[in-house]
Amino acid sequence: MTTETSTAPPTPVDVLVVGGGAAGLSAATVLARSRRDVVVLDTGAPRNAPADGVHAFVGHDGVPPLELLARGRAELASYGRRIVEVEAVGARLDGDRVVVEGADGSAWAARHLVVTSGAVDELPDVPGLREQWGRGVVHCPYCHGWEVRDRRVVVLATTPAAVHQAGLFGQLTEHLTVLVHDPSALDATARQRLGALGVEVVEGPATAVVECDGVLTGVETPAGVVRADAVAVASVVEARSAVLDALGVPLVDLEMFGRVAARHVALDPMGRTSVPRVWAAGNVAEPMSQVVMAAAAGTRVGAMVNAELVAEDQERRLAG
């Protein structure tokens, strides 16, 4: 399915969805099936685009991320709804409407806004790490672990989360090494725990990720190259929050293992933000969610927004 250019309609739509990933497409499809006028604004750059396939999503295991989204777009189009290729860069409340601003100067108005703009992964500053992200460099054992089973995996210890990550990947391979990139990441207790697990600990820091013909082969340190088929690293997940920031929706820190692991928007159980008429779903709100979880969250929020619209319509009719 091809996306449209950003020509905004003259009248407000029922719902705008900012972000066309699993959460956004799921929310939009639920709304479309309820005969709501919904428009998705998207740039076509999902967080998981570098990965070879989506996993742990029943019925879709191994499907490439962009193929999964193409299917979702086609399904939404079958209900006569639109996906518009434009970056949403701002938003404001205008009475009982939300107005979203596009990078091209366009403006889109809706009764309700669902933000599913996702998140970005901030990585340690090691040359080659970003280039291998989603392929030779991974972070989630449930997304990529099976694919590196029984292979040489190096856990790059940049935070105390490395011990947790080593335990998870140690379930999948005996060829596991923890490379200490930041000495403060492992205290004496952590090192003792790794020793008890039989995990080799190598002092760093990492100076570069080594590859051959695009395939990761190791991690360079001042003492030499640690051979590896994959590197596991803990990213910091940062919500894509331009639209939320413009509306004054605050982000909160998610702390894990004594560090800030993510920044995301806080929601009520139905998916509402702290600003009226503004909802969210997916990694922008749940940074550790896999694709299937984001899709489920989008489905839930789509249903909740439709219920809110039904209530508003009823009140309007009763008021005459």
Image (spheres, rainbow, N blue to C red):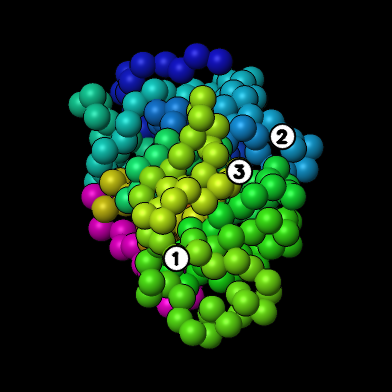
Kindly identify which residue carries mark 1.
Answer: 203
**Residue nearer the viewer, 253 or 102:** 253
Amino acid under label 3? Answer: Asp
Kindly identify which residue carries mark 2.
Answer: 62
What residue span does the magenta drawing correspond to?
246-258
Q: Tell me if mark 2 has few (under 14), some (14-19) or many (20+) residues whose alpha carbon lies within 10 angstroms of its own.
A: some
Against 7, residue 151 (above or below) is below
The residue that appears at 47% across and 24% down in the rendered structure is 83
- Percent across and percent down for residue 268 are 49, 66
The answer to if 252 sits in the magenta stretch is: yes
Circles 1 and 2: CB distance less than 8 Å? no
SS for tag 3?
loop
Task: Find the distance from the CA under tag 1 to the CA under tag 2.
Answer: 35 Å
Mark before the other along the chain sequence, 1 or 2: 2
| Mark sitting on residue 229 | 3
The answer to if 214 sits in the magenta stretch is: no
**Residue nearer the viewer, 278 or 120:** 120
SS for tag 2?
loop
Mark before the other along the chain sequence, 2 or 3: 2
The residue that appears at 46% across and 75% down in the rendered structure is 186
Mark before the other along the chain sequence, 3 or 1: 1
Which mark lies nearer to you, 1 or 2?
1
